[in-house]
Amino acid sequence: MLDDIFLFITLYEAHSFTKAATNANIQQSTVSKRIYKLEEMLGNRLIVRNGKNFNITEFGDYIYNKFKHLPLFINTTLENYKKDFYSDSNDTITISLPFILSYELLSPHIEVFMNSYPKMKLNILYEKEVPDFGVVDFAITRHNISQPGLITSFFRREHSHLYCSNQYAQKHGVPKSIEELNNRKFINLILDHSQHKLSMVNTKTHQEVSPNFDSNIYIDNVMHMKEVGKHATEHLFGCWDFMCAKEFACGEVIQILPDWNIHTLNFYLVQKFNMRNIDKIFLNFISERLGYHVVGKFA
């Protein structure tokens, strides 16, 4: 009966047999049969059918309001069970994380997780190359890996833009067009030991341009580029948006031409088929701390 009540909650909220069937991943006819069976068991009508449509009865409203929080209660109970069950675990998690993403977004939260699982051992390998899955339990990586025994899924996408310091803006003004970027001093990036020619792509029109910057500073580390750029009075710089979020929020740096991306970077989750529950708990924790769920909850 409980599964059928859950199905009725799905139907009530979808107010459509078709949507309810899709959400429950079953046939539409199965939804109708199970709701009818539930009505027989409860001894009262939940819905009044009108062809393909239906109306909720007073009894249906009553049942929904009494049980609508039950799925959340069960999920929360199971999550708390997992937390309580593993809180004294002395298991070891070995993960590979991308350095650039972890430094700003994940590293500040590691202590929070460890406070919940004080006996846990956590090994973090900050990615320098393709992770060794003979060592790590799972990885968040820049590489879209295809190997037997591994599942790779899209995790998160990051964008980078041009920025300038507040001091630069006061002295030179903020460029309002691509043409105004020409001959501006720019801190450029060294990639694979070679100077990088910057291209910018318009997110609306997909037009690609390469401004004629006057580059006389080259740096091979984006974190250091940000530190140099946010204090610069003569140079623009490029940076990942998540890395400049705090400085942008307080007005220390200014984003230039927000419709034009410098670069887009994809991150992937790579996990083993036999992923342990404790690995899933840590992965769910990471997803929550990132602020939005590109990765779904792992059961």
Image (cartoon, rainbow, N blue to C red):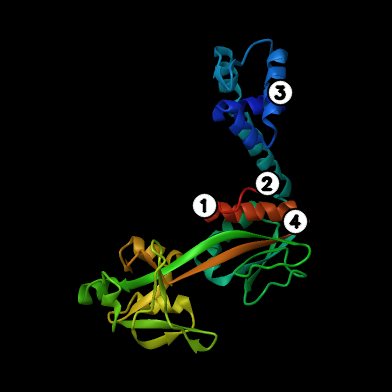
Give the amino acid type for the residue marked by disc 4 in the picture. Met
Q: Nearer the viewer, mark 1 or mark 3?
A: 3
Dot 1 or dot 3, earlier in sequence:
3
Horizontal and vertical percent for residue 230? 35, 74
Horizontal and vertical percent for residue 75? 65, 38
Residue identifier under label 1 = 292
Residue identifier under label 2 = 83
Give the answer, above or below, for where 258 lies relative to 208.
above
Secondary structure of the residue carrying tag 1 is: loop
Residue identifier under label 4 = 275
Picture quadrant where residue 29 is located: top right
Q: Nearer the viewer, mark 4 or mark 2?
A: 4
Give the amino acid type for the residue marked by disc 2 in the picture. Lys
Dot 3 or dot 2, earlier in sequence:
3
Which residue is farthest top? 43
Dot 2 or dot 1, earlier in sequence:
2
